[in-house]
Amino acid sequence: MNARPPLGLLSTLLRAVRTYPRRSPLTFVYVGLLLLGHAWVEYGLTEEQADDLRAYISTNLDNLHDHPVRALAGSALLYDGTLTDITSTGFGGTLITLGLGIVVGLAWAERRFGTPRAAAVFLAGHVGATLITALVILFALHQGWYPESVRAASDYGISYGAQGALAFATLALPRWARLPWAAFVLAWPLTGDEEWPGPLPEFTTVGHLLAAALGFALAAATARGRRRATAPAAARTGG
């Protein structure tokens, strides 16, 4: 009697792992590319080459002005964190972004709503939040809230796209769990902000919050679309 729940859970997990490539093919390939890209940068390049690459793909104002497509595309192929140094804060961030955001959240979105919708969720966070954040930075620079050095700051990786997927995954949860989950999605980017440079938090925190807002908006739009699609069927059944 007591052994059944663990066995049932193990069976469910094994089935999910076995069917992962078939049910979430885009996410499966993307995770593979991220792991290969991380290994290449960490072990295939010299430290100087790796630093130059990260500087080139950072989605800061200078790079978005000079080579926006290459910066956005390159930034989406690396994650800023670690899977080996388990005692670092970077490991926790990797678990949230790569683990929960991409491996779980984006895969669920693809399995539930299809590859195009999942890609749109990621791109809304990665591209949409990046571009809106750039506008916020420009405004903050004009107001004197950020230092000029922010124009060339290091800011690369998948975290904005993952944040959008985390917010969109609210739809996967029962109603009682959605508010606590939304609070977690909004709160975790604030944990590293010890001191705000002005009226606004640090610009990457702004980016994460904007990515979450875009993910929540897509989740709300999707939920409304589902209700509208099921309403006629429910009316016919009721009639």
Image (cartoon, rainbow, N blue to C red):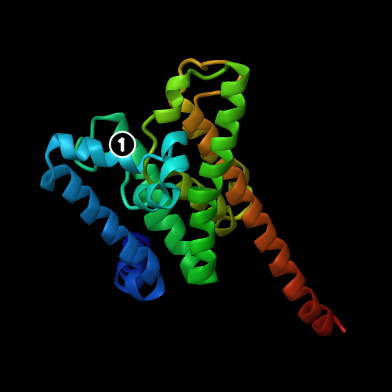
Q: How many marks?
A: 1
Position in image of residue 205 (x %, y %): 50, 31
The amino acid on which the numbered mark 1 sits, given as a three-letter code, is Ala
Reply above or below: 203 against 40.
above
User: In terms of depth relative to the viewer, which is nearer, 108 or 44?
Assistant: 44
Q: Which residue is mark 1?
A: 55
Is residue 125 visible in the rendered structure shown here?
yes
Q: Position of residue 178 (x, y in %)?
A: 60, 48
Classify the position of the C terminus by image quarter: bottom right
Left or right, 228 with respect to 68, comes to right
* Left or right: 172, with 239 as reference point: left
Residue at the outermost front position: 66
Q: Residue at left 74%, top 68%?
A: 227
Taking the image as shown, residue 98 lies to the left or right of residue 131, namely: left
Could you tell me which residue is drawn at 37 percent across and 62 percent down? 5
- Residue 182 location (% of width, % of height): 58, 42
Looking at the image, which residue sits at the far right?
Answer: 239
The quarter of the picture where the N terminus appears is bottom left
Q: Quadrant of residue 234?
A: bottom right
Which residue is at a point 27% across and 59% down the rendered structure image? Answer: 33
Is residue 4 visible in the rendered structure shown here? no
State the residue at coordinates (12%, 45%): 43
For label 1, the SS is helix
Out of 65 and 152, give the one closest to the viewer: 65
> Which class describes the residues within 10 Å of circle 1: few (<14), some (14-19), or many (20+)?
some
Q: Quadrant of residue 144?
A: top right
Work out whether 25 lies above or below 219: below
- Residues 231 and 31: in front is 31
Instruction: Indicate left or right for 19 with 144 as reference.
Output: left
Q: Position of residue 140 (x, y in %)?
A: 59, 24
